[in-house]
Amino acid sequence: MNHKTRMLSFSAAAVLSLLGAGCATTGLTNAQELDLYRAHAGEPVKSFTFFGQLNGWAPLGDTALAVWTRPGQAFLLELPGRCLDLDSAPAITVTNQGSRVYARFDDVLVLGGLHNSFRMPCRIDTIRPLDVKALRQAQKSLREAKATERSGAPTTQPSGT
C-alpha cells in the first residue's frame, strides 16, 4: 500500500469515527439520554460559532441532538418537531450565517442513510451550551453502574450481623 492510499484509508477511518460519534451509548432510552443532556445544559443562547465542520454529534431521538464544535465544547440543539431520520442518520451538518449558527434561523441537515432522497431541513428551535466535563462524568458513572449491574456484583457491602 503506497503512502497516498494509506492516507486515504486513514482519512476515511477518521471520518467514519466522527460520524459514529452519535452511536456511543449509556444503555438509556432516547428520552432518558435527552433528559441527561438537558440536565447538563445551560440557559438558551442565540447562537454559537461554527467554522464549517463539527467535531462530533449525538442524536437524542428525532427532536434533539448534541453537536460538538471542539472536543470540550458542545451544544444541545432542540428542534420544534420531528426531524426525519435524525436518530439513524450516518451524518449531519448545520447551516450557518457568517460562521455562526442561530436558533430559529438555521437548520440541521440530515445526510446519507437509507433515504437518499431530499429531506426537509430541520429548524433549530433552541441552542443550549453543554457542560461537557460534567456530562462525560455522568455518562461514565452510568456506564459503570450498568457494568456493575450486569456483573451481578453487590452495590453495597453486606452487614456483618
Image (tube, rainbow, N blue to C red):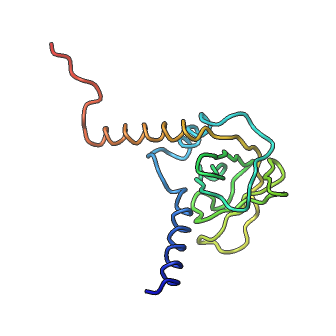
Task: Work out whether 54 lies above or below 130.
Answer: below
Task: Work out whether 150 lies above or below 55.
Answer: above
Q: How many marks overall? A: 0
x and y percentages locating residue 118 in the rendered image: 73, 72
In this view, which residue lies farthest toward the left?
161
| Quarter of the figure that contains the N terminus | bottom left
x and y percentages locating residue 62 in the rendered image: 63, 53
Residue 20 as seen in the image, left or right of residue 153: right
Residue 146 as seen in the image, left or right of residue 152: right
In this view, which residue lies farthest toward the bottom?
2
Give the residue displayed 55% in from the left and 39% down from the top. 133
Using the image as rendered, state which of residue 69 and residue 92 is in the foreground: 69
User: Dividing the picture into quarters, in which one does residue 131 lie?
Assistant: top right
Using the image as rendered, state which of residue 125 and residue 144 is in the foreground: 144
Residue 105 as seen in the image, left or right of residue 115: right
In this view, which residue lies farthest toward the top?
161
User: Dividing the picture into quarters, in which one does residue 151 lie?
Assistant: top left
x and y percentages locating residue 53 in the rendered image: 68, 61
x and y percentages locating residue 113 in the rendered image: 59, 70
Give the residue displayed 62% in from the left and 37% down from the top. 38
| Quarter of the figure that contains the C terminus | top left
